[in-house]
Image (cartoon, rainbow, N blue to C red):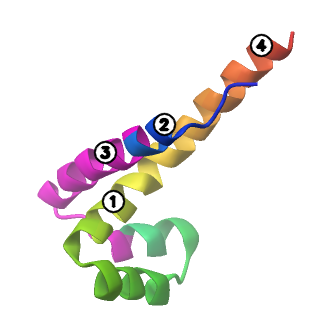
Amino acid sequence: MPQITVGTVVKLIILSLIVGLLLHWFDVSPQDLLRKIFGNVDAIAKWSVDAFGSAASYILLGAVIVVPIWAILFALRWMRQAK
């Protein structure tokens, strides 16, 4: 099974930041995107922005795209190694 290391987490955070900045450039807010995808998570999005500032909103926005893609690729790699 592939290992989840600190390096992997750092890469996911950096990639989430980049994707978040791109989505911000297209004027997509984390609250709008999360509301459309997951329903009413406005309180979580507001809390993250209040607690961590704009960087957290960019990371959260990018993570909505990056983390599911990473999870799918991780699962595919794991299934290949399990054979």
* For marks 1 and 3 on the same chain, the one whose residue lies earlier in the sequence: 3
Query: Residue 81's mark?
Result: 4
Q: Position of residue 64 (x, y in %)?
A: 45, 56
Q: Residue at x 66, y 30 (%)?
A: 3
Q: Report the quarter where the N terminus lies.
A: top right
Q: CA distance from mark 3 to mark 2?
A: 10 Å
Q: Position of residue 10 (x, y in %)?
A: 40, 44
**Which residue occupies the extreme top position in the image?**
83
Q: From which residue to which does the magenta span run? A: 11-32
Q: Residue at x 55, y 45 (%)?
A: 68
Query: Residue 8's mark?
Result: 2
Q: Position of residue 18 (x, y in %)?
A: 24, 46
Q: CA distance from mark 2 to mark 1?
A: 15 Å
Would residue 28 be counted in the magenta stretch?
Answer: yes
Residue type of the residue flagged with mark 2? Thr
Query: Residue 14's mark?
Result: 3
* For marks 4 and 3 on the same chain, the one whose residue lies earlier in the sequence: 3
Q: Position of residue 16 (x, y in %)?
A: 35, 49
**Within 10 angstroms of label 4, few (less than 14), some, or many (20 or more) residues?**
few
Q: CA distance from mark 1 to mark 4?
A: 30 Å
Local SS, label 3: helix
Residue type of the residue flagged with mark 3? Ile
Magenta stretch secondary structure, dominant: helix
Residue behind mark 1: 59
Would residue 15 be counted in the magenta stretch?
Answer: yes
Query: Residue 9's mark?
Result: none
Residue type of the residue flagged with mark 4? Gln
